Image (cartoon, grey):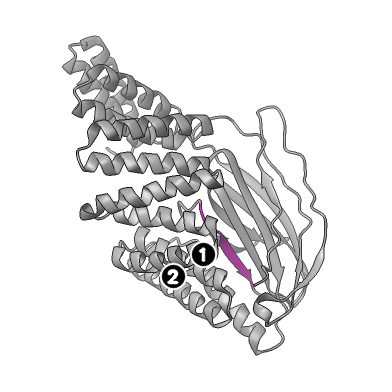
Amino acid sequence: MVSPWIRPRFAWHCTHSRRCKPIISEMKNRLLKPDGHYLLPVMVMTLALLCPRVHAQPLAVLEQEYFVRQNADQPLVIRITPFEGAFTAHISDEEGRMIHEASLQGNRNFPVFIFIDAHEKSRQLDIRIKAPWRTRATQFDLEYNRLDVRDDLSTRLSLAYQSLSLGQALLTSRTAANWSVRVNLLLQAARAFGGLGMEEMRLWSQLSAAYLAHHELADTAMAQDLVSEVIAVSRRSGRARMELASLTLQADILLAQPGEFAAATEALQDVERLAGVLGAVYERAFARFLLGTAMAEQERNEEALVQYESALQIAEQRGASELVTDIRQQMVEMHERLGDLVSKEAALDSVVSELSVSSAQDELVRNLLQQGALYLELSRYPSAIEALDRKSTRLNSSHLV
């Protein structure tokens, strides 16, 4: 199978004092024949990348903006593949009217597809990518296909992309019924792509369904069945990035089941190994973090602490501030279990400092309360009063009142 996607890659390189320069890609035309069935014209778009001034602080939202021309009476499929970035995509027309919003919330490992239906006139589309979570290495691949719908085969292909796009669309009413509809749309897309012989698209659709089944419906049985096949097929076919994404999801599914911590540990070791081969540094750190969590659940406290410390070192180097805070919060618990109050204090101080410059006010209040209790335990009463006073002040702006 010849892939119909051409992938120009763009990275954020922003500082306080400069804006990113526009990046223009070379225009090319190709005729590709996916699965030996149908010729699709594919063009790498000319785009402008606008990058605003970004302050170096946790949870800062980074934005990329692209412009692409949609031809009259021709559907468009946009593919956005993240690398170490969870994002939402907003598509609007020349007059600023919103056409589509897409997001698999929390996803940083596999692509989101956006289907834009045919329009009677040619128009320019504005594609805005907003990433509230990122690392220093965050990048996005963005490409598109112009679909020429002219027969039964191309109509089936168009409908398959449409189902996939609807399944990955941003959902504002987050009810179980609505999520079930999304999962069914993604499974419908997987079947449609399978019928067209487009194996990669079938697998991405199925993996997206597994992701939503796990994270939004808490249906671990369905998610496990779906992701297991993706792992097996992607491993046989040499799709390493897909295998890494599916292994990471599988490990998360297993961790949600109390009796599966040993299996989760094995899956996470596979994630760490493959992430090392692919140079996916954040995924190595995240795998070690989850390994520590699995070991902590098995009361393997010393081993868990070793994993947390290793994950922390990688995450700090990567600039993954949110993961750094999550790791340190778990280290607080490990030091408590091991009776090391000095190390617990140091870890808790770091957590409070990091949360103080973030928007996570509820978490800050909880950790200030924990810090105050620790100071009382250490008979450091002035420090305890200061921490509890800060807690009271922050409580007014949190959601815990």
Which mark is on residue 169? 1
Identify the image quadrant of the N terminus. bottom right
Can the viewer see residue 104? no
Residue type highlighted by circle 2:
Arg
- Dot 1: what SS? loop
Image coords of residue 396 (percent x, y): 32, 32
* Span highlighted in magenta in the image: 109-116
Q: Nearer the viewer, residue 237 or 118?
A: 237
Q: CA distance from mark 2 to mark 1?
A: 8 Å
Check contact, mark 2 vs mark 1: CB within 8 A.
yes
Residue drawn at the location 38% of the way across and 23% of the way down: 350
Q: Quickly name the residue at label 2.
A: 182
Q: Is residue 99 above or below residue 290?
A: below
Residue type highlighted by circle 1:
Ala
Q: Nearer the viewer, residue 149 or 6?
A: 6
Residue drawn at the location 49% of the way across and 37% of the way down: 59
